[in-house]
Amino acid sequence: MGGAVSAGEDNDELIDNLKEAQYIRSALVEHAFRAVDRADYYLEEFRDSAYKDLAWRHGHIHLSAPCIYSEVMEALDLRPGLSFLNLGSGTGYLSTMVGLVLGSFGVNHGIELHADVIDYAYQKMEFFIKTSDSFDRFEFCEPCFVMGNCLEIPPESRHYDRVYCGAGVQKEHEDYMKNLLRVGGVLVLPLEEKLTKITRTGYNSWETKKIIAVSFAPLVLPKHRDNPKPRGLPLPAMFEVRPLQDLARICIRRTLKAGTETAPRPLPRRLGGRARLRQRRAQQRGSALLSNRYVFMSRLIPEPQDSGNVSDSDEEEEEGRGKDCKAVVEPKEVVVEEEEEQEEEDGEEEGREAGALLQEAPVNLLRERILSLPLPEPLKMYLLHYREK
């Protein structure tokens, strides 16, 4: 499933295309998508395909198409402090983006069928925390993944504010999925070949909205489904008492960030498709200008003569040649001037874009403030989540 938008050369251009096609419609979702590079969740040998609007699978590892994740993020209507359950959490790509919205005091759980995929997801999450330029710009709710079948969640388990299922759900399991929600909660899932948003409006009432047609692999049924007493899948604690040092770190980082930015800014952007096109056109014009100038100058250079004496007939010929040369050169000169003016305009526009990009250059004020504190180095590194850069 996918292919609804053009491929991008990088993560930013992919997001630009998703915005243009109206798959990404809110600033909150855009910020989350720009903060997490999709290619980081691919195996190295497949990174070249990361910015195509296509699903990707290798063994048990799977990523849905970017247009699908865009619709899911928009439909979940996320905000800080909510609880989220990801059924079929896979690589953790979606859970990481959700965690950037939920903030430090949200709940971010995932259920995955395969142990090797859970290991892969934790590796990718650690890589994001240690290396991403955007980590310090958000308060992050780290995902917690458990292995098991999502159809084995005990009915007495706590309910969630937001639930997403990444596998095709048949009609017989619809009520089971609905009952994972709190009243007021939102469930997004592929139901009978349609990505569907279900809102729980009351204890026994729901509102349903079909979003787009999709094609997902079906849910894997439990192996012991005929067992009258199947084992339940224990979920992580919904709300656990956090260590005082973790709470102190959250509060210190939040205090230091206060006043620097009221909302996460989008990441600094590379030149977009139009700017790159202008660059290529400027280069082509440059080569054309060189050619025109060569023709222009070659016609102005006089030819070598054998004698300094010029006869009347020679003067007439020279005058004729001069007229011909003038007739040929004048249009060239006008073209050159016009192209130079156009080149200057494009150069000024690209200069303005470059200046805007320069103004958006990432300055990690939080990191600078932490490093300037009169604290022991180990405590500074703890406040930085042990991020070296």
Image (spheres, rainbow, N blue to C red):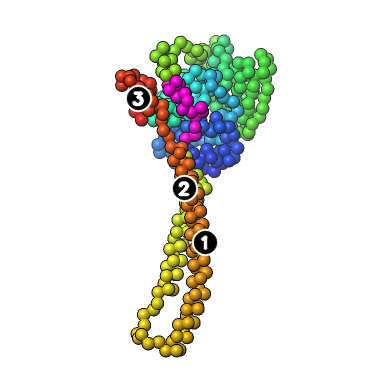
Q: Of callouts 3 and 1, which one flags the residue occurring earlier in the amino acid sequence?
A: 1
* Residue 301 drawn above or below residue 90: below
Residue pictured at 45% horizontal, 59% vertical: 286
Q: Residues within 10 Å of mark 1 (few under 14, many from 20)?
A: few
Q: Secondary structure at mark 3?
A: helix
Q: Which residues are magenta?
A: 253-268
Q: Name the residue carrying label 1.
A: 338
Q: Residues within 10 Å of mark 3 (few under 14, many from 20)?
A: few
Q: Name the residue carrying label 3.
A: 372
Horizontal arrangement in the rendering, residue 308 relative to residue 142 (left or right): left
Residue pictured at 51% horizontal, 28% vertical: 263
Q: Verify whether residue 265 appears in magenta.
A: yes
* Residue 349 drawn above or below residue 11: below
Q: Position of residue 18 (x, y in %)?
A: 56, 38
Q: Position of residue 166 (x, y in %)?
A: 55, 27
User: Between marks 3 and 1, how big is the CA–CA gap?
Assistant: 54 Å
Q: Verify whether residue 267 appears in magenta.
A: yes
Q: Position of residue 252 (x, y in %)?
A: 42, 19
Disc number placed over residue 351 in the picture, else none: 2
Q: Count the marks: how many?
A: 3
Q: Secondary structure at mark 2?
A: helix
- The kind of residue on which mark 3 rests is Ser
Q: Nearer the viewer, residue 316 or 128?
A: 316
Horizontal arrangement in the rendering, residue 163 relative to residue 255 (left or right): right
